[in-house]
Amino acid sequence: MSWLTMFLPEDEYKQKRFISFLAEAAVIAFLTTLIGAALIRLAIIPVIGSEKSFLIIAAVLILYPLIRYILSGMEYGDIFTPQQYKKQMKHITFRSITFFILFNLIYTVATNYQGWASTLQTAGLALIATTLLFLIDMSSLTTSYKKNKNLEP
């Protein structure tokens, strides 16, 4: 077994699909590197710093599989009825609120409370992260529900 398997879902179908998403991301990152190098070599685009180049490649490798997984509708394979959908939405909302509260508490304790300005900045960061996580979960749930509803006889 590879060390990568500890980050993959337990379901074998989901594992295979996610690994294919990772492989697609690697090919896209490789092609991005080749095209970028060719454009720089031909002096069509200005040379960007190596840090920025690495960040672009890292973004492709992280965001592409994430977006593909969200849009694939695989995450919530057991949501078929409106009642299950609503129950899962409540669960996602509760989990998001819990994340927001815990993020703020842990950060405040870990940094030895540095005043209201720091607390507000932390709350803003937590709100952005919470919103992104909520939107990702909600998108995944909605896509899964629509696909599962179409599978039902």
Image (spheres, rainbow, N blue to C red):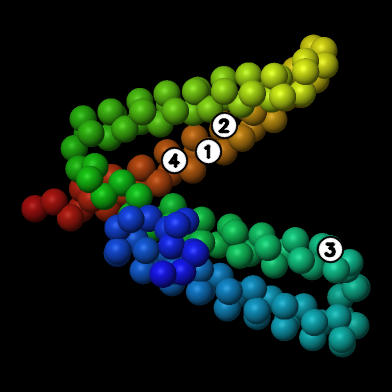
For the point 45% across and 57% down, the residue is 6
According to the picture, the residue beneath numbered tag 1 turns out to be: 133
Mark positioned earlier in the residue sequence (3 or 1):
3
Q: Give the image location of residue 94, x and y in percent.
A: 42, 23
Mark positioned earlier in the residue sequence (4 or 3):
3
Q: Give the image location of residue 115, x and y in percent.
A: 82, 12
According to the picture, the residue beneath numbered tag 4 turns out to be: 137
How would you rate the neighbour count of disc 1 (Cα within 10 Å): few for under 14, some for 14-19, many for 20 or more?
A: some
Whether residue 75 can be seen here: yes
Q: Give the image location of residue 98, x and y in percent.
A: 49, 23
Q: Give the image location of residue 87, x and y in percent.
A: 28, 28
Secondary structure type for disc 1: helix
Q: Is residue 94 left or right of residue 49?
A: left
Q: Is residue 69 above or below residue 108?
A: below
For the point 40% across and 46% down, the residue is 140
Q: Is residue 83 left or right of residue 117?
A: left
According to the picture, the residue beneath numbered tag 3 turns out to be: 51
Asked if the residue under mark 4 is in contact with the one under mark 1, i.e. CB atoms within 8 Å, the reply is yes
Q: CA distance from mark 4 to mark 3?
A: 31 Å
